[in-house]
Amino acid sequence: MKEALIKLGGLSLAAVGLVSCAHTAQANPPERTAVNIAVAAQPPQRAAFSGTGAVIAAHTYNVAFEIAGRVRSVGYDVGDRVERGAVLASLEANDQTIALRAAQARLLGAAATAQKTDGGSRVQERASASDALATARAVVDQARAALALASSNARRADVLFADGDIAAQAHDQTVAAERDAQSRLVAAQAQAASAQAQRSLVDEGARREDRATAHAEELGARAAVDAAASSLAKTAIVAPATSFVLTRTIEPGSEASPATAAFTLTDAAAPDVIVAVPENALPNVHVGTRARIHDLAGDVAGSVLRIEPAADPTTRTANVRIRVHALRARPGAVIAVTLGESRSGGAVIPLGAISTDASGSGVFVYDPATQRVLRRRVIVRRAEGDEAIVADLAPGTQVVSLGEHLVHSGDRVRVVSAIGGTHE
């Protein structure tokens, strides 16, 4: 009986020992692998082109006289600032001035004639025509009365001559008087008709053909004035824009020719920048592409204004003109230029975070909520120093940067902080 209890006690002690070991294992779980974590960063900005460019004037103007002549005056010298519309120089213009005055005088005459034909007769002319018509009609009435009297006398003389009471001579005189009265009536009627016609002309004014001719002459005279004024304007050179005088080739008293530039002007506005871009970078540069100009005053923004249609066959570059509204550099300066800055997709991580196996390149992504790591495949775009830019990974993602060779996908890990602490 005692041995049995001892055996039972032995079994009980063994069982108790097993239970105790189980509790000890639960109280001390396996230690997790310690790793370092890095946060994926934004990729750096990259430019389609970075290099130097030359500052040039936005516009250059070569101006010359349109006609030949002797220079009368020169108003500006090299280095002077000129405003838009300022007269730079002028020629002797006596002949052109006289021609303009003569054309203006002819225009005044033609305009007066056209106005006269449009306005019709004056009041005095209409009154005079009316008076002449009334007088002519009165003469007709008098001639008609005289004819009536002469006809009556002639009929009476016919009767008396037939009866023998008057001589043939007296009869002939009455007949002649009647004929004279008839002639005077016809003449008075013709005069009245003429007065009537004149009154009608005065009332109607000039004929349509006369008015058209008068207006055509006025238009011709006006065109002659414009031509003379244009010829006079060609005796002066006017600044096309606010600018600076770069060169001058004329002096007062010298002979000027349209074939020779009298002045070279540079635009006073903010200058442009010209850069020679290699042809392999041109596909990423377009009109409107943003640019950064780096001068002594700091960075200023600009945009591509124009691109040469083809690259130079020798240098394999094409000139790109950049418009910069706030550039302070003077023409001739050489400054740094960056074209088409942009960020590529993906993220930047330590090069050591990338591991390679049969499935390809990948990283262990850490999940703070579960404290586990999961392996994710990535595509390495490029490596620079101890960093790599990878696709399919968002900036801000936490990846294992040290200890990745000690863990497997799904493992819980212990994160060692950068300052030596632990992150549970």
Image (cartoon, rainbow, N blue to C red):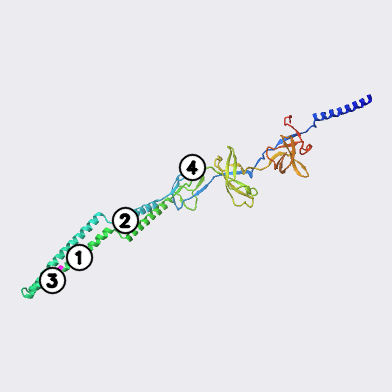
- Seen from the viewer's position, the closer of residues 401 and 225 is 401
- Name the disc covering residue 189, or none: 1
In this view, the mark in front (4 or 2): 2
Badge 3 marks a residue whose secondary structure is: helix
Magenta stretch: dominant SS? helix
First to last magenta residue range: 172-181
- Name the disc covering residue 118, or none: 2
Q: Is residue 376 magenta?
A: no
Q: Residue furthest left?
A: 165
Distance of mark 4 from mark 2, alpha carbons?
53 Å
Question: Is residue 42 toward the left or the right of residue 26 in the image?
Answer: left
Distance of mark 1 from mark 4, alpha carbons?
84 Å
Q: Where is residue 383 in the image (x, y as percent from the top left)?
A: 72, 42
Rendered image quadrant of residue 109: bottom left
The amino acid sitting under disc 3 is Ala
Rendered image quadrant of residue 170: bottom left
Q: Does the magenta stretch include residue 176?
A: yes
In the picture of the structure, the residue carrying the numbered disc 3 is 176
Q: Which residue lies furthest to the front in this view?
A: 1
Which one is earlier in the sequence, the residue at label 2 or at label 3? 2
Rendered image quadrant of residue 303: top right
Which one is earlier in the sequence, the residue at label 1 or at label 4? 4
The amino acid sitting under disc 2 is Asp
- Seen from the viewer's position, the closer of residues 345 and 97 is 345
Distance of mark 4 from mark 3, alpha carbons?
101 Å
Distance of mark 1 from mark 2, alpha carbons?
32 Å
Badge 4 marks a residue whose secondary structure is: strand
